[in-house]
Image: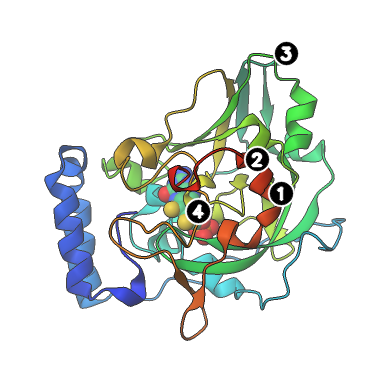
Amino acid sequence: MGTAPRDQVTPEGVYLHRRELLKNGLYAAGTALAVGSGMTWLVGKAPPPDAPELPALAGYQAAAAPYTVAEALTSYHDVTTYNNFYEFGVDKEDPARNAHTLRTKPWPIQIDGEVAKPQAVDAETLAGWFTVEERIYRMRCVEAWSMVIPWLGFPLRDLIARVEPTAKAKYVEFTSLADPEQMPGVRHRVLPWPYVEGLRMDEAQHPLSLIAVGLYGKVLPNQSGAPLRLVVPWKYGFKGAKSIVRIRFTEAQPKTTWAVVAPSEYGFYANVNPAVSHPRWSQATERRIGELGRRPTLPFNGYGEVADLYKGIDPRTLY
Ligand code: MTE
């Protein structure tokens, strides 16, 4: 991502790294934002507000094996104030400050491409088709920090079965909203908008792949990707596209945002792998937000049951 792990850099390090990014033409128009935010970072900003009180989501099943982990949950405060959502700004606390401008009702989602039943459906209607369950997953960001989050959502594979992809569908592409009126970060070319992510069909159909509609028993906060976002716990967090407006089934591998911006640093697969360093930092350990010290990073983020999906592929190419 644009910034290195919070506990490994000085403020100057963050600032200088952003300047390095700005030399790249793609980031040029982001100058005002990045220099501006770099400067305010140096002098300090007011703390972000707590997430607004959100409605509870009733009637979901409590998390059970294999969809839970025996590790302490990251606090609701940390989950909702330490975010990556560049559409609302590049600093970790910017989404909590700015995402109140996102309007999540109505929220039409386009489902198209290689699919027997292309359609436009509102997020609430879509979520109503499926049984929502709680799943407690580790989330490991490529920046070497991690959290444990109690998501509410439904298996992506249930959605795929309902819309009937054709035999040509090899991948699923997820596109996030990019509306400069609701999302101040989109007015700056810090990334080529909209944010796009994707999975191979067999990855998308793995039981662990989740479409989240809530967390901590409540509706998803805007900064977490309301009204619905992708969660793929064995991959780096950037695969989890937020505030999705389009789900497209494709024959060709989707051109995913970070792999387009920095292909030597962020790949399409992005499987968590402590043995393969990021070019600028090690991936061997991580800082669990809210805890002191570092803990070892686990292969596939501890979800080794997915290894079968990658038989015969050199794991070093799966970054
Ligand atoms: N989705 C969109 N649309 N825009 C983003 O900037 N950031 C990604 C991912 N999804 C991002 C996004 C990254 S880098 C991470 S680590 C996770 O969201 C962070 O999710 P969280 O803020 O809920 O912890």
Judge from the rendering whether residue 217 lies leftward or rightward of residue 108; answer left or right. Answer: right
Q: Is residue 171 above or below residue 101?
A: above
Q: Which mark is residue 128?
A: none
- Give the SS element for disc 3: loop
Report, in whole angstroms, how far the alpha carbon at label 4 lies from the one at label 1: 14 Å
Q: Is mark 4 within 8 Å of ligand 1?
A: yes
Amino acid type shown at disc 4: Tyr
Give x and y (percent) for residue 211. Answer: 67, 44
For marks 4 and 2, the one nearer the N-term is 4
Considering depth in this image, is 35 or 162 the residue closer to the camera? Answer: 162
Residue under the point 73% across and 16% down: 117
For marks 3 and 4, the one nearer the N-term is 3
Q: Which mark is residue 309?
A: 2
Report, in whole angstroms, how far the alpha carbon at label 4 lies from the one at label 2: 16 Å
Q: Is residue 232 above or below residue 295?
A: above
Amino acid type shown at disc 3: Ala
Quadrant (top left/top right/bottom left/bottom right) for the N terminus: bottom left
Residue 276 placement: quadrant: bottom left
User: Which is more foreground, mark 2 or mark 1?
Assistant: 2
Instruction: Identify residue for label 1.
Output: 208
For label 2, count other residues whose C-alpha is less than 10 Å away and answer few (under 14), some (14-19) or many (20+).
Answer: few
- Give the SS element for disc 2: helix
Give x and y (percent) for residue 200. Answer: 59, 32
